[in-house]
Image (cartoon, helix red, strand yellow):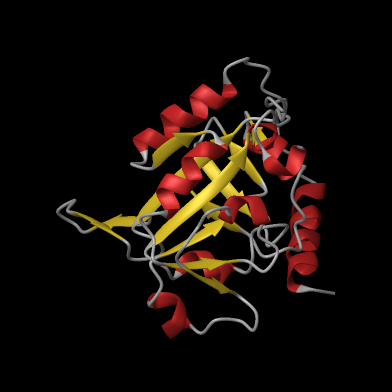
């Protein structure tokens, strides 16, 4: 028996003779059918001080600003079309010092939650391992429109709970007791999101 099993068993025993007087309602929303989920996501990302770009055509201009780029090993080739800088693929795994010396990292994601402005990576296709996106100062993340859902319960159905996950709500930031904002403490100081529609995603061609 695990510690969790033991705790739950004790709770059931304690409540057996004294059940709660009311039933806890769990009828929260599971699906968001609003038609403007992408626009809601953009609004939330702006609140978090992330920079949003529309269309895969924005990538060449963004990458032109980067001289040393980290990428997962399975990055789509079209995402790097025309890139003239140094590409550092994470195979063998780049060390923390190597990652710290690179200008940016380019990845995809697993799902994005419009309601909270959260982008979730789970080490799936075009995402790489967690360290790849946590150490470089700038994270350029490609989000397909079909990866955008409205609510957190929807996002959870798309994730493997056993996979290592990274949840991103804007650039890394923290505040001290006087509310002075400091960015880049726990992850990238700059987050740039490239929103790709189904009509211009190279992996959908």
Picture layout, residue 61 above or below residue 9 = above
Percent position of residue 125, x then y:
72, 57
Residue 116 position, x and y percent, is 51, 35
Considering every residue shown, the one lying at the far left of the view is: 178
Q: Residue at x 54, y 33 (%)?
A: 55
| Residue under the image location 51 percent in, 41 percent down | 194
Depth order, front residue of 167/110: 110
Question: How far from the left and from the top, in percent, is residue 107?
Answer: 58, 56
Quarter of the image for residue 183 reads: bottom left
Choose between 183 and 177: the one closer to the eye.
183
Residue 42, above or below 190: above
Work out whether 29 lies above or below 91: above
**Residue at the image point whose x is 71% and y is 35% from the top:** 154
- Tag count in the figure? 0
The extreme top residue here reads 35
**Residue 47 visible in the snapshot:** yes
| Quadrant (top left/top right/bottom left/bottom right) for the C terminus | top right
Residue 124 lies in what quarter of the image? bottom right
Quarter of the picture holding the N terminus: bottom right
Q: x, y percentage for residue 19?
A: 76, 40
Judged left or right of residue 162, residue 114 is left
Q: Name the residue nearer the viewer: 39 or 157.
A: 39
Residue 36's place in the image compared with 131, above or below, is: above
Left of 62 or right of it: where is 164?
right
* Residue appearing at x 70%, y 33% in the figure: 146
Residue 108 in view:
no
């Amino acid at each position: 028996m695990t510690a969790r099993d033991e705790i739950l068993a004790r709770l059931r025993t304690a409540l057996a003779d004294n059940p709660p007087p009311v039933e806890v309602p769990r009828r929260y929303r599971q699906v968001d059918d609003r038609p403007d989920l992408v626009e809601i996501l953009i609004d939330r990302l702006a609140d978090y001080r992330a920079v949003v770009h529309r269309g895969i055509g924005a990538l060449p201009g963004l990458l032109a600003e980067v001289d040393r780029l980290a990428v997962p090993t399975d990055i789509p080739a079209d995402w790097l079309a025309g890139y003239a800088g140094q590409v550092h693929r994470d195979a063998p795994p780049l060390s923390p010092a190597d990652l710290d010396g690179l200008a940016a990292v380019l990845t995809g994601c697993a799902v994005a939650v419009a309601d909270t402005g959260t982008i979730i990576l789970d080490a799936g296709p075009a995402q790489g391992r967690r360290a790849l996106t946590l150490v470089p100062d700038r994270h350029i993340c490609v989000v397909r429109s079909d990866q955008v859902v409205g609510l957190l319960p929807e996002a959870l159905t798309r994730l493997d709970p056993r996979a290592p996950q990274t949840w991103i709500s804007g650039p890394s930031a923290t505040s001290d007791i006087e509310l002075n904002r400091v960015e880049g403490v726990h992850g990238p100081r700059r987050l740039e999101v490239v929103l790709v529609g189904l009509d211009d995603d190279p992996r959908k061609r």
